[in-house]
Image (cartoon, rainbow, N blue to C red):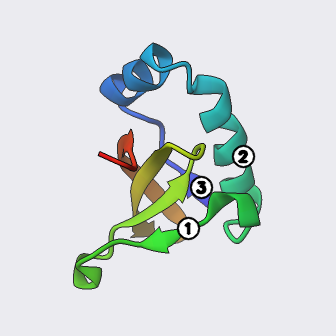
Amino acid sequence: MKILPLGSELIEYLKKRGLATKFEKQKNFFEENPFHPSLNIEILEPKNLEFYSFRIDRKYRAIFIYRGNGVVEIIDINNHYK
């Protein structure tokens, strides 16, 4: 699995919250094994939109979509509890 490069606003979001290192770790897990247990991947509601998320840490998640051919695009990073 390959993750497309993040947009500048997502990079800033990670930096402001001190999540850049945690994100890189989870990104590497995802690219090596998208079924790694620490990712806790889930499909979001409504399921027909096919938005997924994986865990960056207990509080933050990366929202992504499949682009095909083993490529995903992260479209948002947010606080899972807000």
Q: Is residue 67 above or below residue 76?
A: below
Amino acid at dot 1? Ile
Please tell me which residue is depicted at 39% across the width and 18% down the height of the picture.
12
Between discs 3 and 1, the one toward the N terminus: 3
Question: Residue 35 vs residue 42: left or right?
Answer: right
Q: Secondary structure at mark 3?
A: strand
Residue 45 appears left or right of 18: left
**The one of 17 and 15 positioned closer to us in this rendering:** 17
Q: Which residue type does callout 3 highlight? A: Lys
Q: Nearer the viewer, mark 1 or mark 2?
A: 1
Position of residue 57 in the picture relative to residue 35 (left or right):
left
**Residue closest to the eye, 2 or 82:** 82
User: x, y (%) of residue 57?
Assistant: 60, 43
Q: Is residue 52 above or below residue 24?
A: below
The residues tagged by marks 3 and 1 sit, at their Cα atoms, a distance apart of 15 Å
- Compared with 36, 13 (above or below) is above
- Looking at the image, tell me whether mark 1 or mark 2 is earlier in sequence order: 2
Give how far across and how far down residue 78 sits, in percent. Answer: 36, 41
Residue with the mark numbered 1? 41
For the residues bearing labels 1 and 2, Cβ distance under 8 angstroms: no
Mark 2 residue element: helix
Expressed as whole percent of the image width and height from the top left, the position of residue 42 reads 49, 72
Residue indicated by mark 3: 2
For badge 2, the amino acid type reads Asn
Query: In terms of depth relative to the viewer, which is nearer, 42 or 5?
Result: 42
Pointer 2: what residue?
28
Q: Residue reaching furthest bottom?
A: 48
Q: For the residues marked 1 and 2, what is the alpha-carbon distance in whole angstroms?
A: 14 Å
